[in-house]
């Protein structure tokens, strides 16, 4: 069955994202940096923001647990832009080729609703999407099947004809379990080969 639409994850597919980009500037000791990101500002904590919790609330709750790190925790909100690295130009170029070929493009991202608004304004590739589902607005995060189902219903996508691209294997597996075609992103070269094999570029 041919692919008629392509869905992109955003973080680490279209633009690099890593809290270490910020905190390596604030915590010079490598061992302490690792411990801080493992035990304090964790992905599990941040996932609540992706589910819709305001950053101010998340910062307040975590700072109450770890008052000695309050300034560093607050930086995650105040200096959020510094967790975002370079655009992955090779992926954006593939999006542009798909758009030129008339392929409908969608985004499905775990992203805080409040941080999404300025991000979408500042990054030109967002305008290439025909629609985006943002976890913080839905209060659902990948790999919850419900967010994939919401994407399909909202945009009238047939999962069997839709390619979903994500850098996290568990998210791709969740999509495939619902009938989507999946691609685990490891770099633009591999994605280009997959899109070529599907006859999309």
Image (spheres, grey):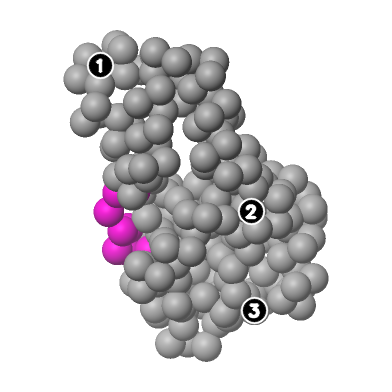
Q: Earlier in the sequence, mark 1 or mark 3?
A: 3
Observer-nearest of 130 and 174: 130
| Residue range of the region highlighted in magenta in the rendering | 84-91
Q: Is residue 198 above or below residue 185?
A: below
- Residue at numbered disc 1: 30
**Residue at x 71% of width, y 65% of height:** 151
Residue 115 magenta-highlighted: no
Count residues near mark 1 (Cα–Cα under 10 Å), then give few for <14, some for 14-19, many for 20+.
few
Spatial separation of the CA atoms under disc 1 and disc 3: 46 Å
- Residue at numbered disc 3: 4
- Residue at numbered disc 2: 135
Helix, strand or loop under label 3: loop
75 vs 105, left or right, is left
Count residues near mark 2 (Cα–Cα under 10 Å), then give few for <14, some for 14-19, many for 20+.
many
Spatial separation of the CA atoms under disc 3 and disc 2: 24 Å
In the rendered image, residue 192, in percent from the top left (x then y), is placed at 41, 65
Q: Which one is closest to the eye, mark 3 or mark 2?
A: 2
For residue 199, say whether it is visible.
Answer: no
């Amino acid at each position: 069955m041919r692919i008629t639409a392509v869905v992109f994850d955003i973080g680490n597919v279209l633009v690099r994202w890593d809290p270490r980009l910020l905190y390596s500037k604030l915590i010079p000791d490598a061992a302490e940096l690792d411990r801080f990101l493992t035990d304090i500002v964790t992905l599990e904590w941040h996932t609540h923001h992706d589910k819709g919790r305001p950053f101010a609330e998340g910062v307040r709750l975590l700072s109450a647990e770890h008052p000695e790190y309050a300034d560093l925790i607050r930086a995650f909100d105040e200096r959020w832009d510094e967790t975002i690295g370079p655009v992955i130009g090779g992926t954006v170029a593939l999006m542009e080729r798909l758009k030129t070929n008339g392929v409908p493009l969608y985004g499905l991202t775990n992203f805080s609703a409040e941080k999404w608004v300025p991000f979408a304004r500042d990054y030109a590739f967002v305008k290439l999407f025909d629609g985006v589902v943002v976890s913080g607005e839905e209060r659902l995060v990948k790999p919850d099947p419900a967010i994939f189902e919401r994407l399909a219903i909202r945009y009238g996508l047939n999962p069997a004809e839709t390619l979903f691209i994500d850098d996290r294997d568990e998210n791709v597996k969740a999509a495939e379990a619902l009938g989507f075609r999946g691609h685990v992103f490891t770099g633009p070269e591999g994605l280009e080969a997959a899109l070529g094999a599907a006859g999309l570029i």
